[in-house]
Amino acid sequence: MNKFDSQQNIGDIVVAFPKAADIFKENKIDFCCGGNKPLKSVIEAQGLDENKIMKKLNELYEVVQKDNRDQSKDWNTVPIGELVEHILDTHHAYLWSELPKISDYITKILRVHGENHPELTKVHKLFHMVKMELEEHLVEEETIQYPAIFRYLEKNENLDLIKAVKVISELESEHTAAGDTLKEIRNITNDYLVPDDACRSYDLSYFKLIEMESDIFQHIHLENNILFPKLVALLNDTCEK
Ligand SMILES: [Fe+2]
Ligand SMILES: [Fe+2]
C-alpha cells in the first residue's frame, strides 16, 4: 500500500519523510513557504504529472525503508563479496548521491542565515572538507581495495588479498578523521539544534547532516569492525597453510 497520497499537505509529507524534499525540489514544488497546501493542488496548478510524482515519492519511501531494515541485519554472517556489494550499493551510492545535495543546502543556509548564525560558516567549511576527503576515500576503496577483494574471491591469488589488507591502516585513519570532523560539526551546531528563526531549508540541512552522520557511522562500522578483520583473518589463514 502506498504511504503517501496527493491529498496530504506538502509540509506534512516532508516532516514524515524528509527525503521527499528531493523530489519536490526536482519538480520546483515549494515545500518551504508553500508547505501548507495539499500536494494535489500544487501539482495541478503547476501542470505536473501527478501519477509520476506520487509513484516516485512512494518508491523512494520504500527504498529508504529497505535501507533501515538493512541496518538491523547481522552483517557478520554475510560472505565478504556480498558485504562489499552491499557497502557499494548502499553507503557509497548514498554518499555519491547525497554529498552534492547536502552541499547545496549548506551553502543556501549560509547565504540566507550566515549573518545571524556565524557558526554556519564553520559548518560550511567543515562539511566541504569532509566531503572532499570522503570522495577521495571512496575512490581509493572503489579503485584499489574493493577490486582487489573481488579479484581475490574470483582467482584466489594471495597477492590480491595482500593488496587489500595493505591499505587497511590508511583507510582506518581516514575513517577516524571523517568521524572527528562529523563530531566537530555536531558540537558546533549544538547537537543539530535548529534555531527559532530557522526556515525549512535550515531544518532539512540539519536533518540531512544527521542522516549522513548515521550512514557514515554504519559504513565505517561495517568496514572497520567486520570487513577489515575478515580480510586480516583470511590472510592469516592463508599464511598458515
Ligand atoms: Fe567504503
Ligand atoms: Fe571506508
Image (spheres, rainbow, N blue to C red):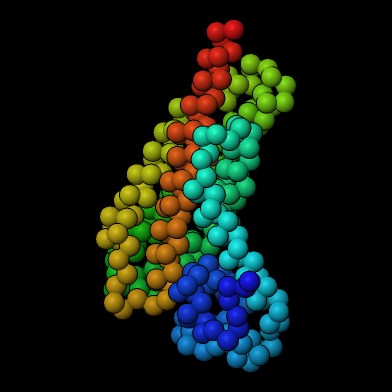
Q: Position of residue 10 (x, y in %)?
A: 52, 82
Q: Position of residue 82 (x, y in %)?
A: 63, 37
Q: Is residue 10 left or right of residue 196?
A: right
Q: Is residue 237 above or below residue 180?
A: above
Q: Is residue 191 left or right of residue 212?
A: left
Q: Nearer the viewer, residue 59 or 127?
A: 59
Residue 87 visible somewhere in the drawing: yes
Q: Nearer the viewer, residue 58 or 146?
A: 58
The residue depicted at 60 percent of the width and 80 percent of the height is 5
Image quadrant of ligand 1 equals: top right
Q: Quadrant of residue 114?
A: bottom left
Q: Quadrant of the C terminus?
A: top right
Q: Is residue 15 left or right of residue 49?
A: left
Q: Is residue 115 above or below residue 142?
A: below
Extreme top residue here? 241
Q: Position of residue 43 (x, y in %)?
A: 63, 86
The residue depicted at 63 percent of the width and 17 percent of the height is 159
Q: Position of residue 121 (x, y in %)?
A: 34, 62
Q: Quadrant of residue 142?
A: top right
The residue depicted at 62 percent of the width and 73 percent of the height is 2
The residue depicted at 56 percent of the width and 20 percent of the height is 234
